Amino acid sequence: MPQSEEWDIVTGVGLTALGVAAGRALETERPDHLVSDPYAGAFVAAADAPVPVPGRFCDTRRLSAAAADLWTSLAAYLGVRSRFFDQYLMEAALGGIGQVVVAAAGLDVRAFRLEWPPGVELFEIDRATVLDFKDEVLGRCGARPRCGRHPVPADLRADWPTALRNAGFDPDRPAVWLAEGLLPFLPADAERRFFERIGQLSAPGSRLAAEHLEPDVRPVIEDPEYRDATRQLGVDIATLWHFEGKEHPSRLLTAAGWDVRSAPAPEIAAEYGRELPGLMARTAAHSRFLSAER
Ligand SMILES: C[S@@+](CC[C@H](N)C(=O)[O-])C[C@H]1O[C@@H](n2cnc3c(N)ncnc32)[C@H](O)[C@@H]1O
């Protein structure tokens, strides 16, 4: 992903945000859903996606068997991921952390769907094209945030801390950070700088949560069958993810003074009483949820 590359909600990395919203729309329809996202279907309906995306108007019965399997398994994983990070952020907020920073927020609507304690300020960092689309749809839906909400249009490979401060973030107060569905998209240098900058902006008592894919996932995503399947999501994920030259985030964070814990995604899924099915189970087997405190 060269630094200059642009994208919007229906191209490149931006389309992955729409795919994740579609997954949450499917998850929301499950009787045993782990998260309920009232706006996910509206995003899908509003975007002119280049591939059939299930959600509000296209259900999985209109997809090929392979695509239906992919979406169902993606949704099952996303339910687990969203619930885990919902709980982590909410625990931090209930514990008195008043600033929440969602990096690469995409079409995340936690500001609207979670019941935040009074005084929480939530910052959503993503590219302007993605945040503009999101605000337009939420505006049409009449959505009202349940906390102070601050969209921060910025590129996470560039000087995003200035944009964050300009949006009202106070580095002297503790914050809880979230990097969900982000790290594989960042090249090694950008990922290292991303964590360095978080360190510089994190007052004592801050926390952080991140989804991390172990590099041994590479043969899985480079497998032709897997690549063909992900192309049905409109992207060739193997071309968007970076693994070269990366240090393990746990090591980076530990060296920077964070106390890090990490759990495999399938283990968290089992705690929620869910087995991860289908194609996405192959990548989920290499996915870990990190949490860290300072
Ligand atoms: C898979 S989506 C995840 C969105 C969201 N975290 C969620 O789980 O719903 C990836 C998001 O990362 C954002 N992203 C990737 N690289 C970025 C960068 N360099 N700067 C800002 N946003 C970026 C994309 O715009 C997209 O919204």
Image (tube, grey):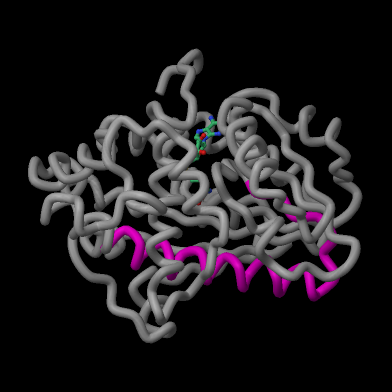
Residue 152 spot, x, y in % from top left: 72, 34
Residue 84 spot, x, y in % from top left: 53, 70
154, above or below 282, in the image: above
Question: Residue at coordinates 41% horizontally, 81% vertically from top-left?
Answer: 32
Horizontal arrangement in the rendering, residue 262 relative to residue 85 (left or right): left
Horizontal arrangement in the rendering, residue 59 relative to residue 106 (left or right): left
Magenta stretch: give its range. 73-102
Q: Nearer the viewer, residue 190 or 63?
A: 63
Q: Nearer the viewer, residue 140 or 120?
A: 140
Question: Residue at coordinates 35% horizontally, 62% vertically from top-left?
Answer: 75
Quarter occupied by the C terminus: bottom right
Q: Nearer the viewer, residue 35 or 124?
A: 35
Horizontal arrangement in the rendering, residue 207 relative to residue 260 (left or right): right
Question: Residue at coordinates 66% horizontally, 42% vertically from top-left?
Answer: 140
Residue 90 spot, x, y in % from top left: 70, 70
16, above or below 87, in the image: above
Residue 242 spot, x, y in % from top left: 36, 35
Question: Residue at coordinates 66% horizontally, 63% vertically from top-left?
Answer: 113
Tally of numbered tags: 0
